Amino acid sequence: MADLSIEFAGIKAPNPFWLASAPPTDKAYNVVRAFEAGWGGVVWKTLGEDPAAVNVSSRYSAHFGANRQVQGINNIELITDRSLEINLREITQVKKDWPDRALVVSLMVPCVEESWKFILPLVEATGADGIELNFGCPHGMPERGMGAAVGQVPEYVEMVTRWCKTHCSLPVIVKLTPNITDIRQSARAAHRGGADAVSLINTINSITSVDLDRMVAHPIVGDQSTHGGYCGSAVKPIALNMVAEIARDPETRGLPICGIGGIGNWRDAAEFIALGSGAVQVCTAAMLHGFRIVEDMKDGLARWMDQHGHRSLEAFRGQAVAHTTDWKYLDINYKSVAHIDQDACIGCGRCHIACEDTSHQAIANTLQADGTHVYSVIEAECVGCNLCQITCPVENCIDMVAQETGKPYLNWTQDPRNPYREAS
């Protein structure tokens, strides 16, 4: 079997699957159960100054898909509501009992050097492997000048990271907020401050739904609500993009990345690793399905790696980065058209409806003598947009087939039709 062990920012773990800083890592009982299930590491739920944070009820809401499948969870929970002393004592014992597992402690204190100078030695004394700076929490804490209020200001990110590198010898991982225009600016700031790694994404500002009878959004606290942090499978595309942006940025190239956001199975993890992540963190999937999901994650990833000849994660980490570029460098002369496998087609007509009503009228609907319909692609009209393939309910029924155009590679910066070509 492939070797899943990693060394991330100097932190060793038997596998890349870590639990993110969240309710599943709030106490020793949970963390021990996670390690018993096979997780390679955890990021302990965010510690802060005493007195501990006070949480509200309710705290979670969800965005549902078909059959009440949870696509994403919105939470308005704050950092730990347990005392610093209790958390530090439990962290010390867990690390002593599980020395082979990665144990990183998430931290959030006021943006004052003395506050960081106070808490860092206490955490280091526990024997923890590293710290993660929570610069991403989008609710509650920003109102107190912490969380995303720091993460949205690159100068603050750099400043606090430098404080932590000054007053702590542990690896420093900076957790970035996605609630920002350009994630690269935050990553660059963390890098300038001396960060050993970055982790992303933290949760996205959201309101998942509204109770139309009570006229209040979920989750409901009395007769009020507020925006919260969105996570789960729905945020995975956003997270993948932000990870890729950092991985391919010349100013942060080589900076270790811990991928977070919608990871629920081994394939999700492999995609993050292919885009440059050296480890991954999971939260929502564990909350929905329990800690045992890591068994399938480890087994599936190892089997896939064996099938492709990858002996270690480093063998394929970042391989997709070189194939990720800006739109202006894509080949304008590349062409593909849809092809429908008639043997696999069930005749539902969804491809035709989508193309006829909202796309390029490139799928013909032919009524047969027996009353059935046959759908076929009009190649001269097909622009290769993929909409038919996306709407088709049968996997691999519709393929996008590359066409030989006889034209050389041409991108927008080279195209004579681009009025800014020379400037580009």
Image (tube, rainbow, N blue to C red):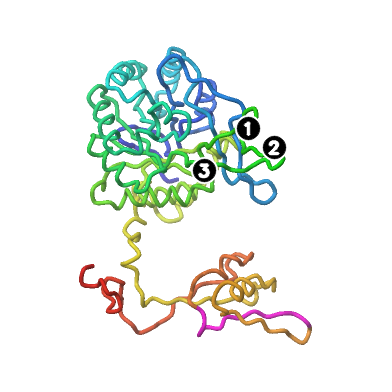
Q: Is residue 156 left or right of residue 307?
A: left
Residue 146, x across and y down, in percent: 38, 28
Q: Amino acid at mark 1?
A: Ile
Q: Is residue 131 left or right of residue 264?
A: left
> In the picture shown, does residue 99 fall above or below 276?
above
Residue 220's disc is: 1
Ranked by sequence position, the earlier of labels 1 and 2 is 2
Residue 347, x across and y down, in percent: 69, 74
Q: Amino acid at mark 3?
A: Met
Q: Which residue is mark 3?
A: 297
Residue found at x 44% / y 41%:
260
Label 2: state its secondary structure: loop
Q: How many marks?
A: 3
| Residues rendered magenta in the picture | 371-382
> In the picture shown, does residue 310 fall above or below 29?
below
Residue 214's disc is: 2
370 in the magenta segment: no
> In the picture shown, does residue 374 fall above or below 18?
below
The answer to whether marks 1 and 2 mark residues whose Cβ atoms lie closer than 8 Å is yes
The residue lying toward the viewer, choosing from 112 and 132, is 112
The residue lying toward the viewer, choosing from 334 and 301, is 334
The alpha-carbon separation of the residues under discs 3 and 2 comes to 41 Å
Residue 124's disc is: none
Q: Nearer the viewer, mark 3 or mark 2?
A: 2
Q: Quadrant of the C terminus?
A: bottom left
Residue 206, x across and y down, in percent: 52, 42
Label 3: state its secondary structure: helix
Q: Residue furthest left?
A: 422
Ranked by sequence position, the earlier of labels 1 and 3 is 1
Residue 307, x across and y down, in percent: 46, 55
377 in the magenta segment: yes
